[in-house]
Amino acid sequence: MGLSSGDAPEMWNVEHPDRIAKLYQGAVDAGSDLFLTNSFGGNASRLKLHDAQNRVMELNRAAAEIGREVADKAGRTVIVAGSVGPTGDIMVPMGSLTHALAVEMFHEQAEGLKAGGADVLWVETISAFEEYAAAAEAFKLADMPWCGTMSFDTAGRTMMGVTSREMVKSVGKLDYQPQGFGANCGTGASDLLRTILGMVDANPDLPLISKGNAGIPKYHDGHIHYDGTPELMADYAELARNCGARIIGGCCGTTPEHLTAMREALETRPKGDRPTLDQITAALGSFSSDSDGTDGNGPVRAARRGKRRG
Amino acid sequence: MSDDDDIILADLNDEDLVAQMFDDLYDGMKEEIEEGVNILIERGWEPYKVLTEALVGGMTIVGADFRDGILFVPEVLLAANAMKGGMAILKPLLAETGAPTIGKMVIGTVKGDIHDIGKNLVGMMMEGAGFEVIDLGINNAVDGYIEALEKEKADILGMSALLTTTMPYMKVVIDTLVEKGMREDYIVLVGGAPLNEEFGRAIGADAYCRDAAVAVETAKTWMARKHNRASAG
């Protein structure tokens, strides 16, 4: 749509609301029941890098307001989900971000999205569960229902080492429960579905969300495009449902053409049995790692040579 | 506390002490690493030997287990922090003794890209492997990279991008190096979540590094080649 490299997309909520409305409209016209607002990087920590840390309320409210308008004239129920991305900071003790500050930042963004008319808050691409929990606490303060997904992009786990199964367990212990949870982004459709299967195995009480990328990014003549075709995403959507996911969507590289194909697949193809890992790789390509840390077959540390400290 | 829990580092012979330091690095125990470094220095070890055999040796295990999906970012950050504690003691001693440098890297995220977790991780792991790292931070234009490479007499340029919208800028930097006739002077490594090997080749980088551990291994391999070329030439 013409965003320059490096500019904050959230600025367009006030500078080019027409383009953002068009972006949302594309998802609605393709048959989406739910779309995410243009506010992924709309927390103070991210906006600070564009010197816009004081505009959290304004930019998030605008992101949701545009969404509200598009959804309300859709002629059917379309949910406006207020997108909340990670702070980009590492939490204590490894990093510098405290729990209190993380809650404060997420809360500020949540209030903006709520003021703009978002139906639900949607935190995603989280790698540390501590950050996920901070978002939950903030959404409770904002008194908003929410959903939340993590990204499992490192040997089947999140960057911080969380497995699919551990996430199910940790979500179950949250004081303020989401409406649904699951996985987004990561390293391709196959990996994402392996994560969903891992979650299903852990018997979650809540609906699972599957939001995979449209393939992987490829470089052509100075431009990047994702190589996942609408046909592949249609197969992914079908398999995601068969795996047990209830909310199915597309992350990076997903266009209205992909969404149209996914919608059609979900409406026209019958629900099938839960696929095996082999069936997933046969349809969508191989996994990025042999194990995802839930099967007991993952790599383990070589024996220590020194004495273990108590 | 049982007797087994008490490890008196000073009572261990050199071999056992180094083995213990490998474990302490792995477990991110900064004070114990500092103590171990001081003991080895007191025993007359050359600072360069402490660096390469005790610290870099230990971090190599951390790096390999990170690469293999045994350790993850939190553990690696703690290990790097422990390593840093040891390095703070060694750095002045290394300078005094005129020890050889393993290599110098200029690193930063490319223009427009403000996502720096990956870049920071590579910087830490490179330092953990004994490289000197000049961190230019986020959002670097081509001029900034080139100025730093020349000023620091660096061996390696590391560029990082998390966004598909910013990664093409890496090619701008490499093309500029070629235009200025400087490309052959540096090892160019690129990395970031949306990149892949094909992209690295397409833009003319020496290598794409999947993660921080691979970055370290690749840097070591290319530095060895550079040394070989220098001695052959």
Image (tube, coloured by chain):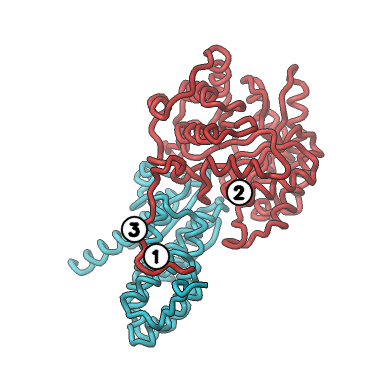
> In terms of secondary structure, where does tag 2 sit?
helix
Type of residue at label 2? Answer: Phe
Q: Residue at x 71, y 57 (%)?
A: A101
Q: Are marks 2 and 1 on the same chain?
A: no
Residue B142 disc label: none
Tell me, yes or no, whether the two marked residues, 1 and 3, touch with CB atoms within 8 Å: no
- In front of the other: label 3 or label 2? 2
Report the side of A153 relative to B100 (left or right): right
Instruction: Evaluate whether residue A193 shows in this view.
Output: yes
- In front of the other: label 2 or label 1? 2
Q: Is A263 in front, or is B201? A: A263
The crowding category of the residue bearing disc 2, from other C-alpha atoms within 10 Å (few below 14, some 14 to 19, many at least 20), is some
Q: Position of residue A59 (x, y in %)?
A: 74, 43
Q: Which residue is identified by label 1?
A: B59
Type of residue at label 1? Answer: Met
C-alpha gap between disc 2 and disc 1: 26 Å
Question: Which residue of the protein is positioned furthest toward the left in this rendering?
Answer: B232
> In terms of secondary structure, where does tag 3 sit?
helix
Query: Chain letter of disc 2?
Result: A
The crowding category of the residue bearing disc 1, from other C-alpha atoms within 10 Å (few below 14, some 14 to 19, many at least 20), is many
Q: Are marks 3 and 2 on the same chain?
A: no
Q: Position of residue B81 (x, y in %)?
A: 50, 68
Q: Which chain is red?
A: A
- Against A129, residue A119 (above or below) is above
Q: Is A112 in front, or is A247? A: A247
Q: Position of residue B197 (x, y in %)?
A: 36, 44
Instruction: Evaluate whether residue A225 shows in this view.
Output: no
Q: Which chain is cyan?
A: B
The crowding category of the residue bearing disc 3, from other C-alpha atoms within 10 Å (few below 14, some 14 to 19, many at least 20), is some
- Against A190, residue A10 (above or below) is below
Residue A129 disc label: 2
